[in-house]
Every structure is written in C-alpha cells, then in structure tokens.
Image (cartoon, rainbow, N blue to C red):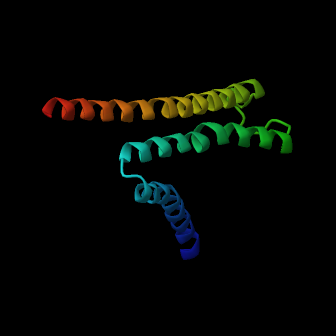
Amino acid sequence: TDDAVSAPKKVKFTFRLISAIPPILGSFFVRDMRVVFNWVGLICFIPCLILPPLLNLKTRRIIPKDTYYDSYFSHALIVRSMLVFGVVSFTYSVSYTHLTLPTIYSVQISVVAVSLKKKI
C-alpha cells in the first residue's frame, strides 16, 4: 500500500515541476516578469479551456452511449461551444498581448526620452 500512496505524490510532484519550470526558464531569457507571466497565462488557456472539451469529444467517439457521469454539460453542442469559447479566448488573448506589449514598451521609452530631453 505504500506504493499506492506514494504514486499520487510522485504524480503531483511531477506536474508541479512541469508547471513551475517554464516560467523559471523564461525568466532566464526575459528580464521583465510581466512578459513571462503574460506568456505563462496564455499557455494556461490550452490545458484549462481547450483540452477538456477536446478530451470530451474524443471520449464520445470512443464511448458513444451515455454513461453514469454524463450531465447536461456533456452534450455535444455544449462541449463544442466550450471549445469555441476557449479557442476564441486564446486567440483574443494572444492578439491582445502582441498588440499591447510593444505599445507599452514604446510609451515607456518615449517618456524616458522626453524626460531626458527636458533635462538637457
């Protein structure tokens, strides 16, 4: 029984490492933590909003009949609309991040340039 108890702990530790290592590695290459957290937040859309509906649709193909665990939210229309919502949210977030981050940096650079120009 010790192996049965330690197996979930190993799995939990492995997934914690998988979720913690990409931000740490990203911080080695990018100095601004806002950029790192923006990208990590974008990547989290995939396992949180896109993969569950995809898994449900794949399971429906394997087991087409209703099971004990089915609910109103297991219907194909609901699952497909959840998938569309996840993809649209991910697309909007990626486009918003790519459009606003360069603007934020250019505004900060221009403010610094104007303040330096006034001092000279």
Q: Quadrant of the C terminus?
A: top left
Against 110, is 6 above or below?
below
Residue 9 placed where, x, y %? Answer: 51, 66
Residue 110 placement, left or right of 30: left
**Looking at the image, which residue sits at the far front?**
120
**Looking at the image, which residue sits at the far left?**
119
Image quarter for residue 65?
top right
Image quarter for residue 29?
bottom left
Residue 46 placement, left or right of 104: right
- Which of these two is toward me, 69 or 41? 41
**Looking at the image, which residue sits at the far bottom?**
2
Against 17, is 86 above or below?
above
Residue 25 placement, left or right of 106: right
Q: Quadrant of the N terminus?
A: bottom right
Against 24, is 43 above or below?
above
User: Residue at position x 41%, y 55% from top?
Assistant: 27
Total marks in image = 0
Residue 100 placed where, x, y %? Answer: 45, 30
User: Residue at position x 34%, y 29% from top?
Assistant: 107
Residue 24 placement, left or right of 90: left
Residue 57 placed where, x, y %? Answer: 77, 38
User: Residue at position x 61%, y 42% from top?
Assistant: 46
- Which of these two is toward me, 65 or 103? 103
- Which of these two is toward me, 49 or 120? 120
Residue 64 placed where, x, y %? Answer: 86, 38
